Amino acid sequence: MSEKSILKKILAGILGAVFSSSGGLPAQESTGKPSIPYSRETILDSLRKMNRTPEKIETVHAMCYKMAMPPKTIEYSCPKCSERTTYPYRGFAGAATRGMEYLSRLASTSFNIATDFSSLCKKCNSSGTEEIRVSLHCQGCSKNIEWSVSTEEEIELLATFFLEYPVKEVDLTRLSFNLRNSDKQMTEAEKIRELSKYIHSKVFCDECCVKFPLLEELPMKEDK
Ligand SMILES: [Zn+2]
Ligand SMILES: [Zn+2]
């Protein structure tokens, strides 16, 4: 290995460590090249498999390094007006600010997901609502789908739109799914099933969710 490539490796390692300790989001390789669009069938097939046979999906539990002494605050710097807004490091706005750079890359996935963080700027947004506006085109009819993310749990879920299809492996480390099942611990299979439902409901509009259901009628003769 040349000196240069060793240095590169070390640098990559440092950058990786910095990111994983500060972001709280799974590290994502950035290749720079836009990913190949997946066909509707590939996505549906994969989501249905995750739903029907979740035990066949590999689960990963990535090592997370907790920052020993996280800063108390983080500054959101507005790309539109350059105003700086200070937020507590922990909590939704802090997590959104930390994840902004990473989640903006959802635009170059095959789902072309647009993320809008402008509500985090105190100058641009006077309503006081802190949210991430998310939009993409329905995989069934291309209609625009929009929703807003306002919890730390869903920020983590947004990272699952980086998954490659067909999905073979899911990192469950930070996916809490506490929203619905607060009193009961979910099994890994249940989490994968829940994840496929979440993705399905977000990449298809309401009409297409009915048209292309996640749980389609099982064939009459099932080969076991
Ligand atoms: Zn602004
Ligand atoms: Zn649709």
Image (cartoon, rainbow, N blue to C red):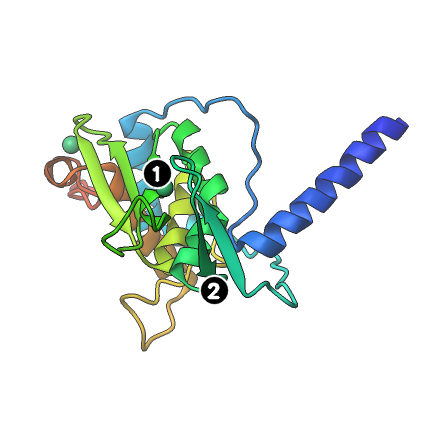
Q: Which numbered circle lies on residue 144?
A: none
Residue 197, image x, y percentages: 27, 50
Q: Badge 2: few (under 14), some or many (20 or more) residues near its Cα, within 10 Å?
A: some
Left or right position of 127 against 34:
left
Instruction: Confirm if mark 2 falls within 8 A of ligand 1.
Output: no
**Residue 164 shows up from this direction:** no
Residue 135, image x, y percentages: 27, 36
Which residue, given by chain and number where applicable, does mark 2 sit on?
A: 90
Along the line of sight, the residue nearer the viewer: 78 or 21: 78
Q: Callout 2, which amino acid? A: Arg
Q: Callout 1, which amino acid? A: Thr
Instruction: Confirm if mark 1 falls within 8 A of ligand 1.
Output: no
| Residue at position x 27%, y 33% in the image | 136
Give the spatial CA distance, label 1 vs label 2.
Answer: 21 Å
Ligand 1, seen in the image, is in the quarter at top left
Along the line of sight, the residue nearer the viewer: 157 or 99: 99
Classify mark 1: helix, strand or loop.
strand
